[in-house]
Image: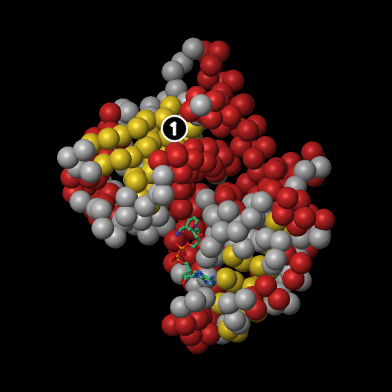
Amino acid sequence: MIFETLDTFGHEQVVFCHNKDAGLKAIIAIHNTVLGPALGGTRMWPYASEAEALNDVLRLSRGMTFKNAVAGLNIGGGKAVIIGDPAKDKSEALFRAFGQFVDSLGGRYITAEDVGIDVNDMEYVYRETQYVTGVHQIHGGSGDPSPFTAYGALQGLMATLNKKFGNEDVGKYSYAVQGLGHVGMEYVKLLKERGAKIFVTDINKTLVDKAVSEYGAEAVGLDEIYDVAADVYSPCALGGTVNEKTLPRFKFKVICGAANNQLSTDAIGDEVVKRGILYAPDYAVNAGGVMNVALELDGYNRERAMRMMRTIYHNLTRIYEISDRDGIPTYRAADRLAEERISAIGKLKLPMGRSQPRFQGRIRGQ
Ligand code: NAD
């Protein structure tokens, strides 16, 4: 049953990690290491069942393979989940026990933060293994990736405007931004600097007030955001907000934002195309975060990170070319770009009989 599932998803290795004394129950999934060691965050969540945890880690790790490949990184896809309540079940022993399991994989899997995990938890993991990113800056960590993610999303936006309107002047268009958290607020700032008209919403009123007073945005209600007559919808909060209830209300011509999993289903992705809306695939647009942590692996450098964010423009352009070439929706074209890259690079390596690259450990204390 499990091997059948792994066959369908195409995973290389799934590791069940158990340490009774530390209260650790975790699963590490390595999906694909053709491009390099598998990198992806660890999520801590009170899963209702072990099957649900397994399903989540399989789905998320596969998603990382596509994301890392489209981002142009020499990095494969992996992910880990820890079964537990982040509010109650965290301890030094738990994270160190987890770190020992990560270490036992010898660099085939490199971890990072995800939902329910913060930089302090990663410090404990780091005591047991070098195969970890997203640690404190004092250890060569890259710090908060959000400003980079926002800047990367802006590059994706410009490529998308260019494709849709033949003009990438951000300030010429209007935007409906949903979510003003770490990424959303920075994104609004970048839009404002370019003279754009911006509508915003967030459940946190303080953040809305800030966007209005500092960036001249116009506040709209939480549900009203879907009816705004703006050119671009920029989801920067939750996933699944492009769905059968919201899509019929859209007057937007473009969907481009930083949130993960914006389309509720593939069928909705097809419907987006029918309505003449250009969708910028989320995982290509928001790759700034993973690019930033990937740079930690060979010594983090801020200028290099900013240069790398600009490649998101070209990644989106390539996705639109594939979409036109093959007559497929952009969300499928993004997957195809990933598959083509993995296949091409895989062919380069295999005939020479070389083993896959292994990360030799982070440069400690940089
Ligand atoms: P965040 O938690 O800082 O911000 C999310 C914001 O959305 C919060 O201000 C929250 O109040 C608001 N929000 C929640 N529900 C809402 C609703 N129904 N309507 C309006 N606003 C709502 O998170 P973030 O780090 O800014 O990330 C935002 C999105 O981008 C997430 O989907 C995340 O997975 C994705 N993402 C983030 C990064 C990164 O570098 N932080 C990288 C890649 C992807």
Q: Residue furthest front?
A: 49
Residue at position x 69%, y 67% from top?
246
At label 1, counting other C-alpha atoms closer than 10 Å, the crowd grade (few under 14, some 14-19, many 20 or more) is: many
The CB of the residue at mark 1 lies under 8 Å from ligand 1: no
Q: Is residue 316 above or below residue 248?
A: above
Residue at position x 52%, y 76% from top?
202
Q: Residue 7's spot in the image, x, y percent?
A: 55, 25
Q: Residue furthest bottom?
A: 213
Q: Which one is in front, 241 or 112?
A: 241
Q: Is residue 5 left or right of residue 131?
A: right
Q: How many marks?
A: 1
Q: Residue 207's spot in the image, x, y percent?
A: 46, 79
Q: Amino acid at mark 1?
A: Ile
Q: Is residue 346 left or right of residue 95?
A: right
Q: Which one is in front, 275 or 85?
A: 85
Q: Secondary structure at mark 1?
A: strand
Q: Which one is in front, 144 or 118?
A: 118
Q: How is the image coloured?
A: secondary structure
Q: Quadrant of residue 245?
A: bottom right
Q: Which residue is mark 1?
A: 30
Can the viewer see residue 117 in this picture?
no
Can the viewer see residue 356 in this picture?
yes
Q: Residue 267's spot in the image, x, y percent?
A: 73, 50
Residue at position x 41%, y 49% from top?
48
Q: Is residue 152 left or right of residue 207?
A: right
Residue at position x 81%, y 59% from top?
276
Q: Residue 299's spot in the image, x, y percent?
A: 34, 43
Q: Quadrant of residue 279?
A: bottom right
Q: Is residue 213 above or below residue 20?
A: below
